[in-house]
Image: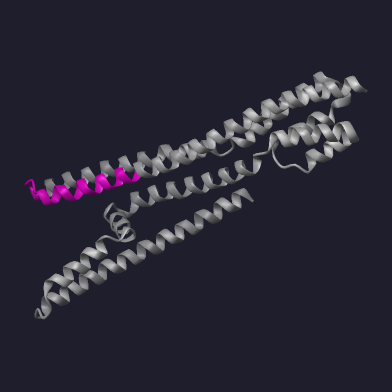
Amino acid sequence: MKKLFAFIAVIGMLSLGASSYAVAQDETAETVDTTQVAEETTVEEPAAPVLEEEAIESTSFHKVVKKQFIQGGAMFMSFVLLALILGLALSIERIIYLNLSTTNTKKLIANLEDALNNGGVEAAKEVCRNTRGPIASIFYQGLDRIDEGIEVVEKSVVSYGSVQMGLLEKGLSWIGLMIGLAPMLGFMGTVIGMIDAFDSIQSMGTISPAAVAGGIKIALITTVSGLIVAMILQVFYNYCTAKVDSIVNNMEDASISLLDILVKYNMKK
């Protein structure tokens, strides 16, 4: 389900980006056609309203983003956009999983202790089965080996806790990969843009500010885009790591409380 969710999110975002790119190209083509028609016909309307309309359109954030995407170059900007889509899909999947793994530890321990004292080990296991999260799973593994002694229970809790911690950290390395790739792709676009600028200078034989500015603009757009993507994904990555650390700390505290409860239970038997 997790892979399917990520795949659906990637396909949806890619189709959305492709449609936005096509619409942006159509809009630029229409603006070129309208300007050519306006030059061929006589001027019948004042220029001030047209300038006001263009100013209003330029203030649209969505149109500005599409314009910068086209000017930055479709190839490298598409790679940067793909890194953003994959990173967001993985981040959303991790956030949902970590939030579902969060458990009210105090309430769980209280319910488990009451069930253990009133109904025995099977009642405590039932409480763990009906509770969501890795802490309940660790408790169940410990209760399942209570007849083998406290030392075996402790080893079981520690071993299964490591397994649960690995599940919590699953996918974070891929988010870190997207964070590293996005600026690299942007810098690669920067290098390509500078190469194009110098190629234009070489073909023209003279240094033209217009020719150099075009390549430098493409280089700067790709660099900024890569850095923005990396900063966005870094926020999600830090949130996920902080959430994992919080859950792991709760797991360790809860494991100690479980051992104490089991020791008291064995002493009453």
Main secondary structure along the magenta-highlighted residues? helix
| Residue 99 locus on image (x, y percent) | 61, 43
**Bounds of the magenta span?**
204-226
The mark tally for this picture is 0
Q: Is residue 201 above or below residue 37?
A: above
> Which residue occupies 86% across, 32% down?
116
> Which residue occupies 11% across, 81% down?
44
Q: Is residue 130 in the magenta section? A: no
Q: Is residue 223 in the magenta section? A: yes
Name the residue nearer the viewer: 187 or 43. 43
The quarter of the picture where residue 189 lies is: top left
Q: Is residue 160 left or right of residue 41?
A: right
Q: Is residue 246 left or right of residue 64?
A: right
> Which residue occupies 61% across, 36% down?
168
Q: Is residue 11 above or below residue 155?
A: below
The quarter of the picture where residue 25 lies is: bottom left
| Residue 250 locus on image (x, y percent) | 65, 30
Q: Quadrant of the C terminus?
A: top right
